[in-house]
Image (spheres, rainbow, N blue to C red):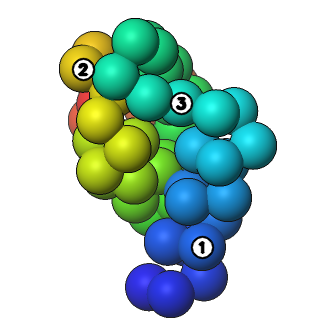
Amino acid sequence: MCEPLSVGVHACRRAEVGPETHVLVMGAGPIGLVTMLAARAFGVPRIVIVDVDDNRS
């Protein structure tokens, strides 16, 4: 799980997310879910996750 975590942290750093940011994660796979966790760790108050597969979101 280190590689998906590094992708999520890198995305949050590049996007400069913080407590005043809202985030949309497109895809509820391993990278999307870990990106959600990274965004939460960066202090994002509202995170929306969408996926084309209804069973995953």
In this view, the mark in front (3 or 1): 3
Give the label on residue 17, or none.
Answer: 3
Using the image as rendered, state which of residue 15 and residue 54 is in the foreground.
Answer: 15
- Which percent across, then down, holds residue 46? 28, 16
Q: Are marks 1 and 2 in contact (CB under 8 Å)?
A: no
Q: Nearer the viewer, residue 34 or 53?
A: 34
Q: Determine which of the numbered discs, if any, sits on residue 6 in the image.
A: 1
Which residue is disc 2 drawn over?
Answer: 45
N-terminal label among 1 and 2: 1
- Residue type highlighted by circle 3: Val
| Displayed quadrant of residue 9 | bottom right
Residue for point 53% across, 38% down: 27
Q: Mark 1 packing: few (<14 Cα in 10 Å), some, or many (20+)?
A: some
Q: Classify mark 3: helix, strand or loop.
A: loop
Residue 3 to residue 55: above or below: below
At 34% from the left edge and 22% from the top edge, which residue is drawn?
19
Establish if 3 lies above or below 45.
below
Quarter of the image with the N terminus in it: bottom left
Amino acid bearing label 1? Ser
Point 39% across, 53% down: residue: 38
Residue type (three-letter) at the residue carrying disc 2: Pro
Q: Secondary structure at mark 2?
A: loop
Tell whether 57 sits left or right of 16.
left
